[in-house]
Every structure is written in structure tokens, then in C-alpha cells.
């Protein structure tokens, strides 16, 4: 069992690095809630990162979303070739970091009025014209 936990920790650390997410218990504690996980202590997260124990299934799901990896692959490794029902592939381009994905998801959760303000701010930075609705 110890080897499986260590292998999980290696996959998690690799996924976090690929997503440009800091592998710190405090950072993951904040992000876990945003990705639908169950709150846990930084000590528990440290145990995941050091291969001491596995997260509960809902936190595996949240971590997998965080690092853009299928949950089964994060937990058990290897490529996912199983047939049957799977979650839709919601992959992002490789250059989009985990923090950028999180920012975009938070943007989408804003009320329309605030999203409009953010779009106008981005347009001001990029000198792009702001489109009206329906264009």
C-alpha cells in the first residue's frame, strides 16, 4: 500500500507542476474548495503530497479537475483506456495553467454585469474593441 500512496503523490506533484500550481498544503487547501472538494487540514494535504495516505474520493475528483487529469489516472496511474461511461473531455490547451483555468471559472461564476466590466478591462489592456451583445 505504501508504494501505491507514493506513486499517487508523484502523479499529484507532476500534475500540479504541469498545471503551474504550487504544491503547498496551504495553496491546495484554498483551491480544493473551489474545485468541489471537501475541506481538509493542511496536514492531511501534506500527507497526500508525501505519499502517506490517499485523499477521499470527492477530493480525488477535485484534485483531478485541478490538474486536468482523469480521476482514475490520478489515483491509479497509466492511461485511461477503459470503455463505458466517462466524463466528457474538458481539456484545455497545454499553455493554459491551472491558475488561468481557475480564474476563467471564477469569471464565469460572476454576475453578467461584473463579467461585462472584466471584459471591458481586458479590452482596455489589449486595445481591442468591446463587442455588443449579439455581435
Image (tube, rainbow, N blue to C red):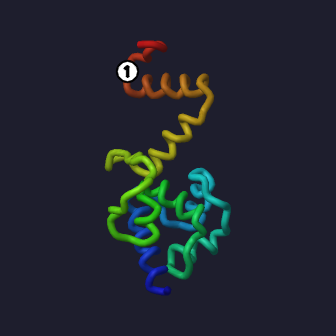
> Is 6 situated above or below 87?
below
In the rendered image, residue 95, in percent from the top left (x then y), is placed at: 32, 47
- Residue placed most toward the observer, 133 or 85: 85
User: Looking at this rendering, what residue extends furthest in the front direction?
Assistant: 84
In the rendered image, residue 72, in percent from the top left (x then y), is placed at: 44, 65
The number of callouts visible is: 1
SS category of the residue bearing label 1:
loop
In the rendered image, residue 8, in percent from the top left (x then y), is placed at: 45, 74
* Quarter of the image that includes the C terminus: top left
Please give the name of the residue rendered at 32% of the width and 65% of the height, measured from the top-left corner: 79
Question: Alpha-carbon neighbours of circle 1 within 10 Å: few (<14), some, or many (≥20)?
Answer: few
Please give the name of the residue rendered at 61% of the width and 61% of the height, measured from the top-left corner: 29
> Is 55 situated above or below 111?
below
Say left or right for 12 vs 59.
Answer: left
Say left or right for 93 vs 16.
Answer: left
> Is 101 situated above or below 108?
below
Q: Based on the displayed image, in which of its 4 quarters is residue 3 positioned?
A: bottom left
> Is 99 situated above or below 14?
above
Please give the name of the residue rendered at 43% of the width and 53% of the height, measured from the top-left corner: 86
In the rendered image, residue 26, in percent from the top left (x then y), is placed at: 60, 64
- Residue placed most toward the observer, 42 or 74: 74
- Say which residue label 1 marks: 128
Amino acid at each position: 500500500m505504501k508504494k501505491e500512496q507514493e506513486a499517487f503523490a508523484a502523479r499529484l506533484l507532476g500534475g500540479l507542476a504541469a498545471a503551474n500550481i504550487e504544491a503547498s498544503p496551504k495553496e491546495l487547501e484554498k483551491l480544493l474548495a473551489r474545485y468541489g472538494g471537501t475541506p481538509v487540514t493542511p496536514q492531511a494535504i501534506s500527507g497526500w503530497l508525501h505519499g502517506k495516505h490517499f485523499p477521499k474520493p470527492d477530493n480525488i475528483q477535485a484534485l483531478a479537475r485541478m490538474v486536468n487529469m482523469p480521476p482514475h489516472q490520478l489515483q491509479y496511474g497509466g492511461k485511461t483506456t477503459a470503455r463505458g461511461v466517462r466524463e466528457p473531455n474538458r481539456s484545455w490547451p497545454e499553455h493554459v495553467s491551472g491558475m488561468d483555468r481557475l480564474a476563467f471559472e471564477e469569471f464565469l461564476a460572476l454576475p453578467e454585469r461584473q463579467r461585462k466590466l472584466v471584459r471591458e478591462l481586458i479590452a482596455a489592456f489589449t486595445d481591442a474593441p468591446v463587442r455588443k451583445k449579439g455581435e
